[in-house]
Amino acid sequence: MTLNRKSFVVAALAAAALVATAPQAFAQAGKIKVGLMLPYTGTFAALGNAIENGFRLYVTEQGGKLGGREIEFVKVDDESDPAKATDNVNKLIKRDNVDVLVGTVHSGVAMAMAKAAKDSGTMLIVPNAGADAVTGPFCASHIFRSSFSNWQPGYAMGEVVAKKGHKKVVTITWKYAAGDESVGGFKESFTKSGGQIVKELSLPFPGVEFQALLTEIASLKPDAVYTFFAGGGAVKFVKDYAAAGLKKSIPLYGAGFLTDGTLEAQGADADGLLTSLHYGDSLENAKDKSFRLAYAKAYKLQPDVYAVQGYDAAQMLGIGLAATKGDVKNKAAFAAALEKARIDSPRGAFTLGKNHNPVQDIYLRQVVGKENKVIGVASKNLSDPGRGCKM
Ligand code: PHB
């Protein structure tokens, strides 16, 4: 076949255009289906609702679209029940065919989600659960966390408690991944600084029969107590600790979940408590101020750490989708965008470590009235060690 000069030029231009567009992402059409797997019942129900509120707030601020695609939601109540977790996450992956999984609060449930996400290749953003394994052995290029690892607030608090001069500490928590790992982080830094853990007390999740354990603490007479409890269980623990007369004699320290989203219910029994967390009230940065105003206006509620983590999970999805023009299947470009992002969070800007866990300041907070007042930074720019993560 011979080409005249004009058709040759046209063909060459068409070929050049093809080469130029081939490696780029094509804008995707249709809705993105986000599967929210969160607790809407049980001791963590308020936490699940706050995460959803935060997530929806960001999407609404973006006009309902991320990366040019409208967001639609499918929801499952995971009841914070690890025994139902695999069935629940498979409903979202196989029945509903979601593009992205967002969940959850409970570490045991999150581990089942991470496994299913890893096996199926479905994108997952964890907006709370701190299970070290999610950004450890289960880490993957399409798995991200907008919150923390259980190790982080615990490790930061171990240093604080040692600096206060306490030598002998009793720990008390629920016996499951989050409790064990929070105590693990605390123990690591506290013992490195010369402290000693006299006894590790625990009860099954989500139990609240604290009485016998509080009696044991009274007889052990440690210098201080470190604890991880959250949600409804945290409310009861703080009240029971005060009612047992321990608040006056043995200082209580905790990962900040102990007093986040719980102060209305805890009242004066929480007054003065010191906790460590990646968020707090009175941060006063510009992003936090506008976030708190918008959240209060939308929901007639004050936001807490869970609302922030939900908001940031949506921001992270937005960053990945903007880079891929809405194509969740383009996992390499999605991950590359997040790996170099500075996420403009109400907690203060943060980045993601190699294992996709936030590298962030862990604040020291003190309960003053109905606020977790930030009184310092317990650990600056703390990254999770990502033990066991190979990516
Ligand atoms: C967890 O199970 O990882 C967990 C639950 C509630 C919190 C924090 C961590 O507030």
Image: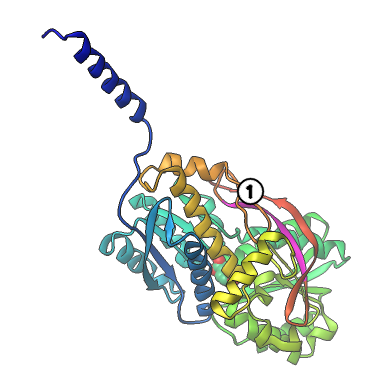
Q: Secondary structure at mark 1?
A: loop
* Within-10-Å neighbours for mark 1: few <14, some 14–19, many 20+: some
In the image, residue 151 sits, relative to residue 333, either above or below, namely below
In terms of image quadrants, where is residue 305?
bottom right
Residue 178 painted magenta: no
Measuring 33% from the left and 52% from the top, which residue is drawn there? 120
- Main secondary structure along the magenta-highlighted residues: strand
Q: Is mark 1 within 8 Å of ligand 1?
A: no
Q: Does 154 sit above or below residue 355?
A: below
Circle 1 is placed at which residue position?
A: 385
Nearest the camera: 356 or 224?
356
Asked whether 217 or 231 is in front, the reply is 231
Which quadrant does ligand 1 occupy? bottom right
Query: Is residue 35 found left or right of 292 in the rendered image?
Result: left
Amino acid marked by disc 1:
Pro
Q: Nearer the viewer, residue 335 or 384?
A: 335
Which image quadrant for residue 253? bottom right
- Is 361 a magenta residue? yes
Which residue is at the far front? Answer: 6
Q: Is residue 70 above or below residue 15?
A: below
The residue segment tinted magenta is 357-365
Residue 26 image offset from top left, x and y in percent: 34, 40
Image coloring type? rainbow
Residue at the image position 70 percent from the left and 83 percent from the top: 238
